[in-house]
Image: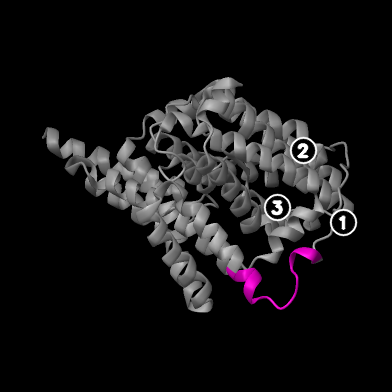
Amino acid sequence: MFRILNDFSLSALVAGFVAVLIGFASSVAIVFQAAQAAGADSSTIVSWIMALGFGMGATCFFLSLWYRSPVITAWSTPGAALLATSLGTISYSEAIGVFVFAGVLTLLTGVSGLFDKAMRLVPLPLACAMLAGVLFKFGLSIFDSMMSDTFLVGVMLITYLVSKRLVPRYAVLFVLVAGVAFVLARSEEQLISTIPVSLGSLVWVWPEWNVSSLIGVGIPLYIVTMTSQNIPGVAVMRSSGYQTPVSPLISWTGLTSIVLAPLGGFAFNLAAITAAICSGEECHKDPKRRYIAGLSAGLFYWLAGLAGTSVVALFSVFPSTMIAALAGIALLGTIGMNLKNAVADDSNREAALITFLVTVSGVSFGGIASAFWGILFGVICLMISNIKRKQ
């Protein structure tokens, strides 16, 4: 306890809050669509939000505390998108069975250590290139948002540039405050007062097993979560200098998915975007003290889960342009650092560039996300380059 107090910093606390804000606001609508596709009613949808909040809160807090590094987890956004288009033909209890099955596959992957071994074969420059590719669109979103909301995003960007110069540790905090103040100032109504204050309730549904749905939905859910979420999540940790063992993290996310699936916790995984916010210098200059951001994110996720529908209404108050700009600005330093690390070594530069370009392109073969193909193409390029050098 005393160590936590000694390591505490406001910047890390804010990083955790921003991670939760962006994590919820950027994709909670997709979770709603997935729940509705599964046949969930309004009370069951609230149970989904609560289960996801509690699961992410527990894994963020305890894993960050145990490993003393910012371990940030998230729900599988690509998985939610997959479920939104795949669950219409099966019952809700069969959908719960799909969630449990995908969680079991994730747990087995973690316990076996196969994922950890595979990630150790990926050179750091390629991991950095892939991560930069994943985050690249968030940097672009600053200026995409500026086209539709020039003054709001302009104020946030200027605030960042000035505060980065004067008080760099708290730059993201000032950007958040500036964005919220601007939105409240230009609104003609009291936005905060329109948010309902209420707690939701958990709804438990026992799973049922349908072999065709387990194969047709459960395996794709597992694959898309591993390739588009866990691979970038590991890359974030490695590029930030954290050698946290991967297998236990994957195992715990899989176990959490199994336990909370009957309540609506469809898939938990390592985060990439929000983890990058909690792992960079903007969080804290001392990497050993950034785990506080993981604890902070865990607490805010718990509160988000406990609040249920209220927190969803809160996040919906702020315009999407503000959320997109905040995410992009918070990730600028991480994008730049990973681009630098990716191309710094001449021997890996071409392979890293290919990894970056494939990831940015968004190509998807067989429903597997571009992050996986970026790593694969980069490794193949590196292997061919090494053969030429030996000859």
Residue under label 2, please give it: 261
Vertical comparison of 90 with 150: above or below: above
Q: Find out whether the residues at labels 2 and 1 contact each other: C-beta distance under 8 Å.
A: no
For badge 3, the amino acid type reads Leu
The nearer-to-camera label among 2 and 3 is 2
Residue under label 3, please give it: 83
Mark 1 and mark 3: Cα distance apart in space: 18 Å
Residue at screen point 59% across, 43% down: 225
- Give the label on residue 259, or none: none
Residue at screen point 57% across, 27% down: 5
Q: Position of residue 155 (x, y in %)?
A: 48, 70
- The C terminus appears in which quarter of the rendering? top left
Circle nearer the N terminus (2, 1): 1
Residue under label 1, please give it: 42
Q: Position of residue 81 (x, y in %)?
A: 65, 56
Q: Is residue 86 magenta?
A: no
Mark 2 and mark 3: Cα distance apart in space: 14 Å
Comparing 76 with 16, the one in front is 16
Where does the magenta region start and end?
182-193
- Residue 242 visible in the current orientation: yes
For badge 2, the amino acid type reads Ala
Circle nearer the N terminus (1, 3): 1
- The N terminus appears in which quarter of the rendering? top right
The crowd level at tag 1 (other Cα within 10 Å; few <14, some 14-19, many 20+) is few
The crowd level at tag 3 (other Cα within 10 Å; few <14, some 14-19, many 20+) is many
